[in-house]
Image (cartoon, grey):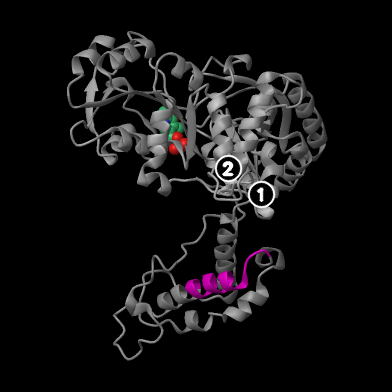
Amino acid sequence: MRKVTEPTAPPTIITMANPPPPSAGRSDHHQAPPAGPGGPDAAALRALPSVEQVMQALPEDLTGPLPRPLVVRVLQDQLDQLRAIALGRRPGTPVRDRDEVVEHLHQAVAAVARERLQPVINATGVPLHTNLGRAPLSHAMEALATVAAGYNNLEFSLETGGRGRRGAYVERLLAVIANAEAATMVNNCAGGLVLALRHLISDERDEVIISRGELVEIGGSFRIPDILAASGATLREVGTTNRTRAADYRAAVSPRTALLLKVHQSNFAIRGFTEEAGLGEIAAIAREHGIPLMHDLGSGAAIDTACVPGLPHEPTPAESLAQGADLVCFSGDKLLGGPQAGVLAGKAGLVQGIKREPFFRALRCNKLVFAAMEATAVATLDSATGDGAGRGTALQQLLATPLATLRERAETVANALAPALAPRFGIASGHLKGRMGGGTLPDASMPSHGLRITPADGSPGPQAVLDRLRLSHPAVVGVVQDDAVVLDLRTVAAQQDLALTAAVRQALAE
Ligand SMILES: *Cc1c(COP(=O)(O)O)cnc(C)c1O
């Protein structure tokens, strides 16, 4: 529900993918117009401006950043739609006022402008917010800029002058991080899982044994059973939702078994009467039968998350491999804090085999991802060795920000804003609890500090405040909690405090 008076719900925009019905075209006057509700509406037709007239009327700061042909296309589509309504060929209310038409077109262009990829201040306190691009990459800026700006040795060997191996260096780094014989990287973890499954199953051996407690939905229509089906695997479910024992795996092994798969539950936790076979026990069964064991870790914490106040220990790829998994996969942009990618690590033979799969080519990463992942892996390793050189990834830095620093920043922002917002809004700094997000650590809550904006009676409510903040420049994304808007500073970079202050002041100005 939107309650803002400012730009409201974006108007419907006709695009090529959703063309108007054929009868709505302009060049079909030789056809008998279908009987509309009231036939042509002369006043509404007269109210339609030309594209050029609208271009003149739109504010420069709106159209300036948008390519002119795009604006023209949006306006033409909208005008076609309004004309079809005016002609009675399309359901809708004819608009007979020129200013109203221009305002409608203004909003249509503004809605397109908001789709532009742009920086957003994440004040949700959720560091791995999937909708906001998951892990921040400020630690990789230099690598991204240098690699993107010119040529590089992506597939060129500086050693021989001949063709080189794409990703050779980052594969070494990832293998060190996972303490694995070998590692490689594809477009994302879901892709890595499909690729590994396709490599491991065959016509004779197509069954994948997995616990019923791990047939999870990761989010955004990503369901483990669907992934298995898409890979051509036959699902062999064992155990129950809450309890699966090692004996269940053992009983299910047959000559058709291609692999044992363990999937990290990621975004939920089961409490109560539960039992889960340990990775070590499952590994023993896998070894007994000469079947590979794969562990989809999802979040893939390279660092010990327990060193962050409020966070439990999250299984690391190195631990899974040490416990006997032959292959692990995990996301690059979750707890590793890197770009979107899927890392596969484990036995050298398996990793090399996967790299020879024809499908590997379809999932390979581009130079920007390699550059960002290289910087991420280096930052991770530097922080782990504690040589003082590196402060870790942007995610690590954000998690390591002391509570006292966040409190100080929150107090500064609150003090700066309080006089401007009074008496319509109260603002106070206070203690908060954040979640990790990205489908990781569902039970954990991290202590944090931030701002609480409380509307006085008669002022726009919390949802309206949230909407205004989201529509400001830069956009500020917060959350509503107990009739107040909460802005958590854990996920706001210190350099963004001034922009945040300005955005709040502007959004809540009378
Ligand atoms: C997040 C997750 C995935 C998917 O990772 P993407 O990199 O987003 O494709 C797969 N498996 C598990 C267990 C996850 O948590």
Image coordinates for residue 1, horizontal then vertical, percent: 49, 45
Query: Is residue 252 placed above or below 231 in the rendered structure?
Result: above
Q: Distance between the residues labelled 1 and 2?
A: 9 Å
Identify the residue shown where x is 77% and y is 31%: 414
Check the image and name the residue furthest to the front: 160
Q: In which quarter of the image is residue 196?
A: top left
The secondary structure that dominates the magenta segment is helix
Query: Is residue 284 placed above or below 337 in the rendered structure?
Result: above
Q: Local crowd at mark 2 within 10 Å, few (<14), some, or many (≥20)?
A: many
The residue that mark 2 highlights is: 370
Q: Which amino acid does label 2 sit on?
A: Phe
Residue 482 visible (yes or no): yes
**For numbered disc 1, what is the local secondary structure?**
helix
Q: Which of marks 1 and 2 is nearer the N terminus?
A: 1
Query: Is residue 34 placed above or below 128 in the rendered structure?
Result: below
Q: Which of 293 and 3 is in front in this view?
A: 293
The magenta-colored residue range is 65-78
Mark number displayed over residue 147: 1
